[in-house]
Amino acid sequence: MAKILLCVCGGIAAYKVCAVASYLKQQQVDVTVAMSEAAQKLVGPATFQALTANPVYTDLWEHPGGKDPQHIRLAREADLVLVAPATANIVGKLANGIADGLIATLLLAADPKKVMLAPAMNEGMWQHPAMQRNLKFLQEIGIRTIGPATGWQACQTVGVGRMSEADEICREVLAAIGVK
């Protein structure tokens, strides 16, 4: 069974990630979720636990089940690490080697070729030269991206930066892990 580590960051698009987790589980993928503190303000860990039937990791220092304090194991054992929504914050941290929380630490422990980002942010943030520089660097080291799309954004504007829809993300993930 393929294993996905799904890292949920604190963008409003976090609600879409529930559909991603559910669909991947229905395709017999073992989904483990790690959530940032900001993501937990938008969607509760209990939602992802119910959808995946796995414990949800929310803190660098607390470990569901308590057996293995090596949270790095989550990144090492995953066939793919999906970050959705991949906020400008987490993209910047990853590109600059900052490991100041659970998700940033997991991403730095993961093989870049096993990481996939689904960016989601305001159009101005997406187009900022620092964001584009960070994304270009991450792509150069083997990290893949899905989207973003153009559409209605939470800031009440239309532009590029909207997270891709759940079905597109799932297609890309399943293709990457060889599940049809």
Image (tube, grey):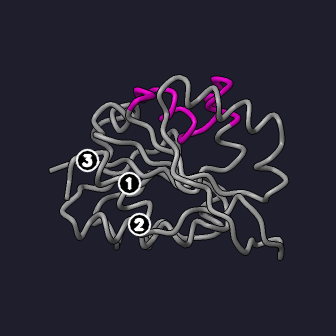
Q: Main secondary structure of the magenta part?
A: helix
Which range of residues does the magenta coloring cover? 92-113
Q: Residues within 10 Å of mark 2 (few under 14, many from 20)?
A: many
Foreground disc of the pair 3, 1:
1
Which of the image's four quarters has the C terminus? Answer: bottom left
Check disc 1 and report the residue beneath it.
Answer: 172
Q: CA distance from mark 1 to mark 2?
A: 11 Å
Left or right of 45: which side holds 30? left
Ranked by sequence position, the earlier of labels 3 and 2 is 3
- Cβ–Cβ under 8 Å for marks 3 and 1: no
The quadrant holding residue 72 is top left
Q: Secondary structure at mark 3?
A: strand
Between residues 61 and 89, which one lies in front from this camera angle? 89
Check disc 3 and report the residue beneath it.
Answer: 3
Q: Secondary structure at mark 2?
A: helix
Q: Secondary structure at mark 1?
A: helix
Left or right of 53: which side holds 112? right
**What's the residue at 56%, 72% (across, down)?**
15
**What's the residue at 35%, 38% (across, down)?**
74
